[in-house]
Image (cartoon, helix red, strand yellow):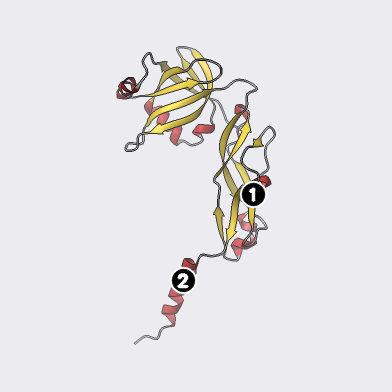
Amino acid sequence: MTAVKQIEASARAQVGKGAARAVRRQGLTPAVIYGGGAAPEAIALDANKTRLLIYAGHFLTTLFEVSVDGKKTRVIPRDYQLDPVKDFPIHVDFLRVAAGQTIKVEVPVHVVGQDACPGLKAGGAMQLVEHAVEIDVSPESIPEFLEISVAGLNIGDSIHVDALKLPAGVSLTSRENLTLVSIVPPSVDSEVVAAEPAEAAAKPTA
């Protein structure tokens, strides 16, 4: 489950590219809160704190309460932009959320059961086809991740999205036949690399 985190913000009177650049020069990140049947609200966040929140992980699946002049709004990040050179946040979009509302979010897939996977023990490799899946869920119930087990899979086997065990209140919106994980044969390159030392050892020395 996601915990609600607090963010302090200030209102922005001006919008547009020029105003956004001026905000960034002050060490702030321009942002906007939209949705919920209300007009978009332009705000500014502390750039350093925002950067730490983004790089801490799970940013797009974390609930926040944004406080602007004492008024708190519950939101979830929907998108953010990073400077392509310096990697600091240059804009954040927040969506207002209300009690009883459900939203679509992507959550990561964690693989377990490798120790009980015959295909891996036989030299196969695990190919994670999808790193995340989209779900429909209330903001208060967003799971940090969903688990999929490869226990019992042999080389050539795959496991699909319908094998995921979903918490209560979570429904999948990804397509039904979506492949998540496959156990594939060893690559030719790895076999060649493994064979080279053995061939070198078999050659007689001069």
Q: Quickly name the residue at label 1.
A: 160
**What percent of the width, then of the height, locates residue 127?**
55, 55
Indicate whether 196 appears above or below 7.
below
Q: Quickly name the residue at label 2.
A: 192
Provide the secondary structure element on which disc 1 rests: strand
Query: Is the Cβ of the residue at disc 2 closer than 8 Å to that at disc 1?
Result: no
On residue 14, the disc is none
Task: Identify which amino acid the numbered label 1 is placed on.
Answer: His
Indicate whether 203 appears above or below 110.
below
Quadrant of the drawing holding the C terminus: bottom left
Q: Earlier in the sequence, mark 2 or mark 1?
A: 1
Counting the numbered discs, the total is: 2
Task: Identify which amino acid the numbered label 2 is placed on.
Answer: Val
Taking the spot 61% from the left edge, 55% from the top edge, the residue there is 114
Left or right: where does residue 54 sit relative to residue 62? left
**What percent of the width, then of the height, locates residue 74?**
54, 20
Q: To which quarter of the image does residue 166 belong?
A: top right
